[in-house]
Amino acid sequence: MSNYLNIKKQLLKACILFVENKHTTISKSIASNKNDLFSETKSSAGDKHETGRAMIQLEMEKAGQQLAEVSFMQTVLSKIVVTKVSNIVCLGSLVKTTKGNYFLAVSVGQIKVENHTYFAVSAQSPIGKQLLGKKVGAIIEFNKAEVLEVV
């Protein structure tokens, strides 16, 4: 069981690092857009100026939404207790199936730990919704093609 705990710790660490990197990238983008917005000077081509400002505003709104998503992901990760052991799939569960290994946390994608591949997925993702609340030995149908057995 301690090996599972070690794997869960490494998966959580990888998820946290992913979210921190994403936060840094978005923050840099926002700072750059603010700089662009303030340095945009009014020219004799007024329409061109207004179009440029509008495009920057749209980029900033998009980055703001991404920042809110990252903040939500950080909140989710802060709630994960890797030492929790349960026969029912919940947030922070390491789920091994006959078709793949999943870590129920946030959507990060593929993570390699100790030469095994795990998929970090959120509870809101299609596979996350299917796995959430299932017990060991449960069989679920996913994408109408795969049958996963929680082991």
Image (cartoon, rainbow, N blue to C red):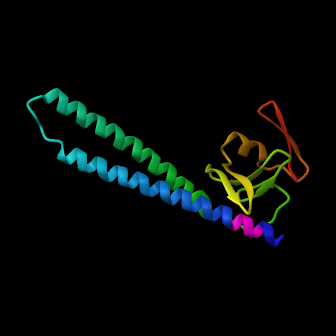
Q: Is residue 117 left or right of residue 60?
A: right
In the figure, 25 relative to 41: above or below?
A: below
Image location (x, y in percent) of residue 80: 66, 63
Q: Residue furthest bottom?
A: 2
In the figure, 123 relative to 76: above or below?
A: above
**Observer able to see residue 150:** yes
Residue at horizontal 50 percent and vertical 60 percent from the top: 20
The answer to if 103 sits in the magenta stretch is: no
The prevailing secondary structure element of the residues shown in magenta is helix
Residue at horizontal 86 percent and vertical 50 percent from the top: 150
Image location (x, y in percent) of residue 104: 71, 53
- Quadrant of the image for the N terminus? bottom right
Image location (x, y in percent) of residue 32: 30, 50
Residue segment shown in magenta: 5-9
Residue at horizontal 70 percent and vertical 39 percent from the top: 126
Image location (x, y in percent) of residue 148: 85, 42
Q: Is residue 134 left or right of residue 21?
A: right
Q: Is residue 138 left or right of residue 120?
A: right
Q: Residue furthest front?
A: 115
In the figure, 131 relative to 15: above or below?
A: above
